[in-house]
Image (tube, helix red, strand yellow):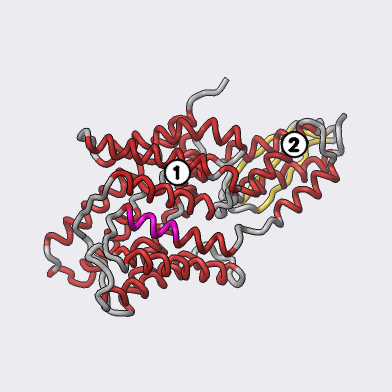
Amino acid sequence: MTEAAPDVLELSLRTSALLFANGETTERSMAAGLRVAEAFGQRATMLAGWDGLSVRLEGAAGPLHDVAAAAPTAIDMNKVLAAEALVDAVAAGRSSKEATRSALAKIAAYPPVSLGRFVLAAAVGAAGLAVVFGAREPTTLPLVALSAGAGALLRRALATVSPSPIVQPLSAAFLAGVIGGLAERLGLSSALALVALCPCLVLVPGPHFLNGLLDLARARVALGCARIAFASLVVTAICAGLLLGLWLVGADLPYAPPSRSIHLGLDLVAAGFAVSAYGSFYSIPWRYLAFPIAAGIIAHGLHWLAGEMGATNHAATFLACLFVGVVMRPLARRLRLPFAALSFAAVVALIPGSALIRMAAGMLQIAELGAKAPPDVTMAVVANAITAVFVLLAMGFGLVLPSLWPRR
C-alpha cells in the first residue's frame, strides 16, 4: 500500500538523521531511510553532507525534496540500536506512520549514559591506559582516576550550557593539565607525566576518524574530509587545553619520555578495562559490552605477539586492527550497532594519542626557543609525528578494509 508521500518523506529523513547524528556509518544511515520509504511504498534517493541529509521521493504528483540538519558529532549506541530495531519493525510492517513518528521522537529524547557510569568509566579507562603505558608509582593511578573523573563531571556540566562539541574536551584537557602539572610540581608524577596525559587520551574522537575513512573509501570525499577535519580539530583542542593547563601551573610535558614494559597479563587486563570505559562513553548496553572487551583483549595480545616476533609498531597495530575489523564487521550488523564506535572501543589501547600530545608539547618548545631549540627536540617532534601518522593509518586501514569486502 502506498502512503502519502510527504509523510513518508518526513519519516525517511528523520530516521536517517537520527542514525547519522549518533555515530552510525553514512552507508547504513542512508540505507535505513531508504528502507523506511520502501516499506511505505515510495522510492527514495538520499545524499549526505557534514551538516545534514537530503532526500528525494518520486511521488505520483512529482518529485518531493527535503533536507534535515544533522551534524555527525555524537556517539550514542543506545539510540542507534533502538533506531535500527524500529527500522526493522517498519520494514516488516509492524509499525504504522503514527507509531513510527512517535517512536522516533522517544528515541531522540533518550538520555545519555548515567552520570555515575560516565564518571566511573572515565576514571577506569584513564587508569587502565596508565597501566598500559607503564604506570608504576603508587600515586599515579589514583591521581589519573581523580583527574579523569573530575573531567567527566566538568564535561557533563558544560553539556547543559554549551552545544559546542569543542568546549567539553578543551575544558577537560585543561583540568587534566592543571592537576597533572600540580602533581609534577609536588613530585607525585613520574617522568612519563601520565597523570596529565592519560585523562586526555580518553577524549580522543577515534570513531569520527574511522567514519571519515569509511566515507573516503566509499568516494564521499567531502564528507570524509569533513569528519577527519572535525576529529583533528578536537585533538587540537585537547592538546591546547592540556598544554595551557600545564603552563598555568609552571609545568612541562616531556616530549621524549623513557619507555617502560609491563607484564603481558597485566597489559591485557588493563586494556580490557580501557575498552569497557569507551563502551560506556558510547552508551553501549551492558549486555553487549563483553563483545568489544573480548575483541580488544585478543587484539592487544596479537599486537604484543607481533612485536615480540619483530614487527614494527605500525605493522603490529595493523594486524591487531585487521582482526578487530574482521570480527566486528559482521558483529556490528548482527547487533545493529555502529561499526566505528564498536570497533574503535576495542582498539582504544592502541591509539597514538600520547605521540600526538607529546608532538604538540615539543612544537611548543620549538616555538618558544626558536633557533636556540636543541636538535633533539626537533627530532623528537618529527619522530612523534611520524609515529602518530603511521599508527593512525595502520589502525584506520586495518579496521576499514574488512568493511570494503563485497557482501552477497
Residue 186 placement (x, y as % from top left): 27, 78
Residue 14 placement (x, y as % from top left): 72, 47
Q: Quadrant of the C terminus?
A: top right
Residue 327 placement (x, y as % from top left): 47, 32
Is-magenta flag for residue 368? no
Q: Residues within 10 Å of mark 2 (few under 14, many from 20)?
A: many
> Mark 1 and mark 2: span between their CA atoms?
31 Å
Is 78 or 114 nearer to us in this picture? 114
- Name the dominant secondary structure of the magenta segment: helix
Write down the residue under mark 1.
346
Mark 1 residue type:
Ala
Q: Is residue 168 above or below residue 321?
A: below
Is-magenta flag for residue 127? yes
- Residue 2 in the figure: left or right of residue 146: right
Q: Quadrant of residue 88?
A: top right
The residue that appears at 43% across and 52% down in the rendered structure is 274
Write down the residue under mark 2.
36
Q: Which residues are magenta?
A: 124-131
Q: Is residue 64 above or below residue 134?
A: above
Mark 2 residue type:
Val
The residue that appears at 72% across and 38% down in the rendered structure is 87
- Residue 330 in the figure: left or right of residue 321: right
Q: Quadrant of residue 315?
A: top left
